[in-house]
């Protein structure tokens, strides 16, 4: 019925949506949207390094993004610059260095559009393995640190006072973000990964009243976006990333209508 | 165990915190034992909250030592704001740092009089209601040590008294130690075991009686403060007229 490449893209997309759902909720709760952006910009550097040394893209992106994330955590504690300035600094410097490195790679040609916006044709069996094994690991670790992470999201000092070690779980969470960016580059593309993380979660926020419900709805929203996005990508030949994110936007708008009805009900 | 046969829960030894080119507090020592209420008093900016946070381990780069003999600690912070981006109900908040049975949750909320709010969204509560939920959360798991930083702020007058009574009741019932920060000198002097008066350093400390009689305390809080204790201790054998003169009862 469908071509193999499409089935592969679908399986990859499902794997990614299962992981971005819960992580996206934490990004929204912790106001980390721009942090996600910085990490995905730094992913370009990871990609070029992967081409340079001929290593796996997901692996090298994961290393570079985690390094950038941990540098950011360190800078936040040691400099007097505000968080958003540090994010901008790291985002643009890693993007610039990444582009400079591309300049050196004159002998290798690669599909920059596919990299930026995702390409369903590019997913192979190894990518599927990386997505599903990596995704399962991310979810497992997230489950293990859920309680202290959520507690420190609600109130850092309360978590600290009652022995939850928030600094450690925050660092682990940051590495998990780098990991999801690394494994979803091929499908979503590095410009739109943050969108994949926050849009289903934002949609879920509109219609949920407690954290677990929001996580579940965020996963469902992500899965629906992947289905709608990938099918339309196949039908009208658009890049996969923008199609998935547009589908997520559509869902977000639908939840806005629900909010509107609800507030009218209250009047 | 110390010489009074009471178990020490936390011991703070000559701690200080240097931040932004000044000492917020320095040389503060105190000890909380099981079944005891220790209160920190002092003017604004005297380092009460800082001292509590040092004791809790929230401030890490400190001078001095903190020895904790328990991990079961309940904390009611002075300021806490719940981000509206978080869809969180009272019941989710109760489970924030601990695992509780349904019964434990309801019991704790009942104690502070807010069991009807169990499924309400946290950000929709009033200040006083939220404060009651904070206290309920801190006591739900029967901690060994309770650290309460202005626990009744924003609670109505009647509720304030009953909450303080509740706190005292809890300390007896679950036999925990309490480190309390309060502005309410009446309460501090009437129902706590040990008072530490701070002003960047320990200005004086001891039983409420001895602190109230201390000159430094009187300098810090003014003359009227020392009479507070007597308000509690004397029998009301007289009333006051509008201008404050004493009218003896017949």
Image: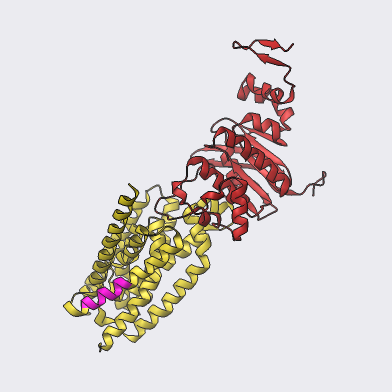
A216 or A32, nearer to the observer? A216
Residue B28 quadrant: top right
Residue B57 to residue A179: above or below: above
A231 or B89, nearer to the observer? B89
Outermost residue, left direction?
A236
Instruction: Say which residue appears at 54% left-offset and 57% top-offset.
Output: B96
Q: Is residue B41 left or right of residue A91?
A: right
Q: Quadrant of the C terminus of chain B?
A: top right
Residue B5 placement (x, y as % from top left): 82, 47
Residue A86 placement (x, y as % from top left): 35, 54
Instruction: Say which residue appears at 56% left-offset and 50% top-offset.
Output: B115
Q: Is residue A52 left or right of residue A19?
A: left
The residue stretch that appears in magenta: A224-233
Residue B80 placement (x, y as % from top left): 49, 45
Give the colour chain A carries in the figure: yellow
Give the colour chain B carries in the figure: red
As for residue A225 lying within the magenta part, the answer is yes
Q: How is the image coloured?
A: by chain
Residue B42 quadrant: top right
Instruction: Say which residue appears at 52% left-offset and 53% top-offset.
Output: B118
As for residue B239 lying within the magenta part, the answer is no
Residue A200 to residue A76: above or below: below
Q: Is residue A87 left or right of residue B17?
A: left
Residue A78 to residue A249: above or below: above
Q: Is residue B41 left or right of residue A123?
A: right
Residue A165 placement (x, y as % from top left): 55, 58
Is residue B134 visible in the rendered structure shown here? Answer: yes
């Amino acid at each position: 019925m469908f071509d193999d490449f499409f089935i592969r893209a679908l399986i990859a997309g499902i794997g990614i949506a299962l992981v971005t759902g819960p992580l996206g909720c934490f990004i929204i709760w912790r106001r980390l949207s721009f942090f996600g952006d910085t990490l995905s910009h730094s992913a370009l550097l990871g990609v070029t390094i992967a081409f340079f040394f001929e290593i796996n893209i997901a692996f090298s992106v994961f290393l570079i993004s985690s390094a950038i994330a941990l540098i950011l955590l360190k800078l936040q504690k040691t400099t007097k610059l505000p968080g958003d300035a540090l994010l901008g600094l790291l985002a643009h410097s890693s993007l610039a260095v990444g582009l400079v490195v591309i300049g050196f790679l004159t002998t290798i040609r690669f599909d920059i559009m596919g990299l930026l916006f995702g390409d369903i044709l590019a997913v192979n069996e190894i990518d599927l393995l990386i997505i599903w094994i990596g995704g399962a690991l991310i979810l497992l670790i997230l489950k293990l640190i859920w309680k202290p992470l959520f507690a420190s999201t609600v109130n850092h000092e309360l978590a600290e006072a009652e022995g939850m070690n928030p600094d450690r779980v925050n660092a682990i969470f940051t590495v998990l973000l780098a990991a999801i960016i690394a494994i979803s580059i091929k499908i979503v593309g590095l410009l739109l990964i943050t969108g994949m993380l926050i849009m289903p979660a934002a949609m879920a926020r509109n219609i949920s009243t407690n954290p677990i419900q929001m996580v579940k709805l965020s996963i469902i929203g992500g899965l629906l976006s992947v289905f709608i996005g990938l099918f339309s990508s196949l039908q009208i030949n658009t890049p996969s990333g923008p199609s998935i994110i547009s589908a997520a936007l559509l869902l977000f708008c639908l939840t806005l209508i629900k909010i509107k009805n609800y507030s009218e009900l209250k009047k | 165990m110390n010489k009074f046969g009471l178990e020490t829960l936390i011991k703070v030894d000559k701690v200080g915190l240097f931040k932004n080119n000044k000492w917020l507090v320095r040389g503060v020592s105190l000890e909380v034992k099981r079944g005891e209420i220790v209160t920190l008093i002092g003017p604004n900016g005297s380092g009460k909250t800082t001292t509590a946070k040092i004791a809790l381990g929230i401030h890490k780069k400190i001078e001095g030592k903190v020895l904790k003999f328990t991990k079961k600690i309940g904390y009611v912070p002075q300021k806490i704001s719940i981000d509206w981006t978080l869809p969180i109900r009272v019941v989710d908040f109760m489970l924030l740092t601990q695992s509780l049975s349904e019964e434990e949750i309801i019991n704790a909320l009942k104690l502070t009089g807010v069991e009807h709010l169990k499924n309400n969204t946290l950000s929709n509560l009033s200040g006083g209601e939220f404060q009651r939920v904070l206290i309920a959360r801190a006591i739900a798991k029967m901690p060994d040590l309770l650290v309460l930083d202005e626990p009744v702020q924003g609670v109505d007058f009647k509720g304030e008294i009953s909450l303080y009574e509740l706190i005292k009741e809890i300390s007896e019932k679950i036999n925990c130690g309490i480190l309390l920060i309060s502005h309410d000198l009446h309460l501090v002097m009437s129902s706590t075991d040990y008072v530490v008066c701070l002003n960047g350093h320990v200005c004086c400390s001891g039983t409420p009686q001895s602190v109230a009689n201390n000159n430094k305390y009187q300098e810090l809080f003014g003359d009227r403060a020392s009479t507070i204790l007597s308000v509690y201790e004397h029998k009301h054998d007289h009333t006051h007229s509008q201008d404050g003169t004493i009218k003896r009862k017949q």
